Every structure is written in C-alpha cells, then in structure tokens.
Amino acid sequence: MEIILVRHTTPDIEKGVCYGQADIPLTNTFREEIQPIIKEINFNNSDTLYFSSPLKRCKLLAKELSNTINFDDRLKELDFGDWELKKWNDIDKEELNIWMNDFVNIPATNGESYVDLHTRTVNFLNEILLLNKERIVIVTHAGVIRSLSAYINKTPLDKSFNLKLNYGHIIKFTL
C-alpha cells in the first residue's frame, strides 16, 4: 500500500501568528501552487482513496484532486486552544516557555499536546491500513505529516520537527 501525505498550500495569515485548527483561508497563489501537486498526484483509479482534514486550507486542495474525499477530524492540525490566532509574541511567555520545553507532552493552554495529536493520527493510520487499498492520498497539515512520518519511520516525536515541510510538500510511503 502506498500512503501519500500532502501538505496544504500557503495559508493567508500574517507571519508570526499561531494557528492550528483555526479555519483560515489560502493565499491568492492557490491555483498556481496546486499545479505541481495535481501533476504528481494524478490518480483516477478506483483503488485510490482520498482523505483530508476538513479545514478549508486542506479541503480546497483535496477537492482539486478528487471528487470523492473522506473528511476526517483526526487529520486536523494541533489544537492550540487559547493561543489560536494570537501572535506568538503576545502569548504569555511563561506558558510558552513551559510548552516549548516539552511540546511533545505539554498542551497549549486549553489545547492539545503533540502526543494527543499523535495518538489520533496513528489511530487514523492504523484504521485506514485495514482498508487494503493500493493507494491512499491524505491532504493534511505539517503537524499531522510529522506525526505520521515519525510513527512510520520509528522516529521519536521530539525529533519529528527535523522534517522540514514546505506548503504543498508531498511525502510517499510504501507500507
């Protein structure tokens, strides 16, 4: 089975703003950015399943790839809770430092930890592996891609951020 993870294109949000599950729009370069993705992910056979985060920055891309998409909340980005849509510089320094010292286990204030995200994404992956399809395409977020990549490659979660992901990035795994 081939698992293809695709990161959404560039979101339309100011640099330095914390966003995870906030449903933000995409930049006006969307049409341009999706062209190489569409070219590489051109699967129209019945043995390919498409999944996507329901957030519009993923949903729009997924709809360009297929007419039949399975939206799953487990594919949403990390929930930053009270920090959503705040500038990183405006988040309480003490809270932020505690989180940064152990982002794997400590949740953002009223949000979730990276372990929480990892648990839900691994549950999703294990569930779709049972579908026994030739190919699964998943349009999602950087945190989810890093989590799944860490699980597949047996990388410790605290090292998963060494994986650099650009907008529109595609990673393929054969399982």
Image (tube, rainbow, N blue to C red):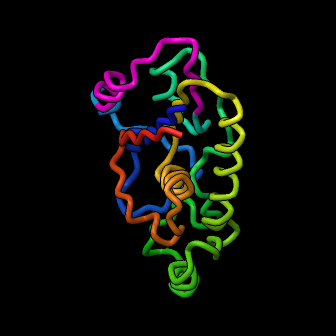
In the displayed image of the protein, which residue is found farthest to the bottom?
Answer: 94
Judging depth in this view, the residue of 127 and 142 nearest the camera is 127
Say whether residue 81 is left or right of residue 18: right
State the image quarter where residue 71 is shown: top right
Q: Residue at the location (51% across, 55% down)? A: 143
Across and down, in percent, residue 32 comes to 27, 28
Where is the C terminus found, in terms of image quarters?
top right
Instruction: Indicate the quadrant where residue 50 lies.
Output: top right
User: Hey, which residue is sitting farthest top in the picture?
Assistant: 45
* Residue 44 image position (x, y, % from top left): 48, 12
Indicate the quadrant where residue 31 lies. top left
Quarter the N terminus occupies? top right
- Where is residue 113? Give x, y as percent: 64, 67
Residue at the spot x=65%, y=63% of the render? 81
Does 87 appear above or below 147?
below
Residue 70 is left or right of residue 39, and the answer is: right
Magenta span includes 48: yes
Q: State whether residue 18 is above or below residue 57.
A: below
Whether 102 is among the magenta residues is no
Question: Magenta span covers which residues?
Answer: 33-51
Name the residue at 58% across, 39% down.
55
All told, the count of numbered labels is 0
